[in-house]
Amino acid sequence: MVFPLPAAQTLCGRLRYADEAMVTVAFLSSIQDFQEGRIQEVADRLRKEHPEWKVEVVPPDGSKAPLAKFKLKFGPAILVNDRIEFVGIPRYRMLVERIAMVAAARISPRTAQPPPVPPAGTRPAAPAAAAPGPPPG
């Protein structure tokens, strides 16, 4: 009988393996120096509580090009794996939950879902016949 191997674990938590994707979180600063203290506070807390995530704060001068790429004029914004996730600074818990979803490769419930695909072997329903109109004349 063969038992599945459990994930390697240490006293400090689960070990990361090389095949797991590293999550990068970039805080784009506002070019108007808006909420600069809050950005730094959230980034520091995220680094402390989640050392497995790469967290960086982009200064206002470096934020202009990424903000323009996403058609934003001012900022602040948060990129997770080079995709914009938040404009502005959300509550800490909401931010951590969203980053964890991205790390687990789960789709956000707020993302528009594709239309359902009919099962194989079934034909789509025929369009309804047009209602008869009034006779000509």
Image (cartoon, rainbow, N blue to C red):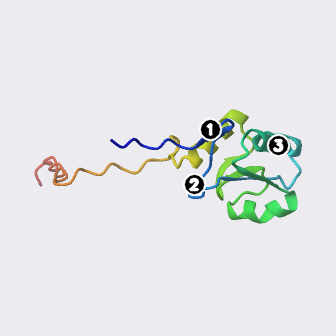
Mark 1 vs mark 3: which is more N-terminal?
A: 3
Which residue position holds label 3?
A: 44
Residue 24 locus on image (x, y percent): 69, 54
Residue 112 locus on image (x, y percent): 47, 47
Disc nearest the viewer among 1 and 2:
2
Mark 1 vs mark 2: which is more N-terminal?
A: 2
Q: CA distance from mark 1 to mark 2?
A: 18 Å
Residue at the extreme front of the image, as rendered? 1
Q: Look at label 1 and name its amino acid.
A: Glu
Which residue position holds label 1?
A: 97
Question: Along the line of sight, which residue is nearer the eye, 127 or 17?
Answer: 17
User: Mark 3 packing: few (<14 Cα in 10 Å), some, or many (20+)?
Assistant: some
Q: Look at label 2 and name its amino acid.
A: Glu
CB under 8 Å between discs 1 and 3: no
Please indicate whether residue 54 sits to the left or right of residue 104 in the image.
Answer: right
> What residue lies at 23% left-to-right and 50% top-to-bottom?
119
Q: Look at label 3 and name its amino acid.
A: Asp
